[in-house]
Amino acid sequence: MLRRSFLVTAGALCALPLHAQAKSSTLTIRWLGHTSFLFTSKESKILVNPFRTVACTKGYQSPAVEAELVLMSSRLFDEGAVEVVPGNPKVLFQPGVYDVDGLKIQGIRTLHDNKEGRRFGVNVVWRWTQGGINLVHLGGLAMPLTDEQKILIGQPDIVFVPVGGGIKALNTEQAIQTVKDLNPHLVVPTHYRTPAADSTCDLTPVGDFLKAFPKTSARTYPGTEISLSPQQIPKDALQVRIFTYTNFNPETRAT
């Protein structure tokens, strides 16, 4: 069994300064499917929400990529499969304020189902600054944010928001309102149905979410990776970015 360094002791919950890390460089964001992303910069290589290839993630390749730090929004199969990650990265999976090798990270407690947390319990929203860019990954947020949670999250440069509905993610209307509440510069939708899902997946496609935004604000990347500097973050108008993941196993496409 692979060893993992689980970091579970955190300081008091509070809002970190948005510019706690002032280092500026290029940040590379790579989508691995579902809510899993790899963030690479000079400071660190951070993997969020590695998953097992079942149900809604059945047709994706396993996110078995090297990282120095793994952030998990839950311990469920689609967000907490740390065993697929090679090596011995440090792992965070509980709400709190952390300092990992000088990188300040905040995990904010929210709910992971629309049954007041009775079904799937806690979802952790992750907030940190990397490459000079303020990032918020909402994980599997399934209930509208409270005022306290909004204050803790602040205004991110980029927010990764679940939009596919079902019991473990915001529905279209809730996702749109969450974007309005957080007022980010860039939005990356996550946790929606793609051809990778099998027939048991209860998520909806991303199209309904996109209809809420002007066509000029949405841009699809022909691949799974982009690199951004702080200067490339749009400041005047909200923009939506969609990755195009084509590396599916055709045998698992939904019918």
Image (cartoon, rainbow, N blue to C red):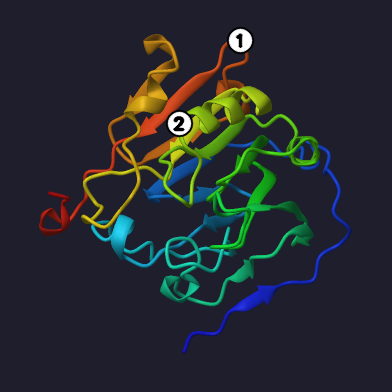
Tell me the residue that label 2 is attached to.
172
Instruction: Tell me which label, 1 or 2, sits earlier in the chain.
Output: 2
> In this orientation, does residue 183 appear?
no
Q: Residue furthest right?
A: 12
Residue 121 picture location, percent across and down: 61, 62
| Coordinates of residue 44 in the picture (x, y in percent) | 61, 55
- Whether residue 62 is visible here, answered yes or no, is yes
Q: Amino acid at mark 2?
A: Thr
Pick whichever, 237 or 24, lies toward us. 237
Q: Is residue 153 left or right of residue 159?
A: right
208 vs 80, nearest the viewer = 208
Secondary structure at numbered mark 1? loop
Q: Residue 9: give x, y in percent of width and height.
A: 79, 71
Residue drawn at point x = 58 percent, y = 35 percent: 159
Q: Which mark is residue 236?
A: 1
**Label 2, residues with CA under 10 Å away: few <14, some 14-19, many ≥20:** many
Do tag 1 and tag 2 residues touch (Cβ < 8 Å)?
Answer: no
Element under disc 2? helix
Indicate the amino acid at tag 1: Asp
> Is residue 173 found left or right of 10 in the rendered image?
left
Q: CA distance from mark 1 to mark 2?
A: 24 Å
Residue density around tag 1, few if under 14, some if 14–19, many if 20 or more, within 10 Å: few
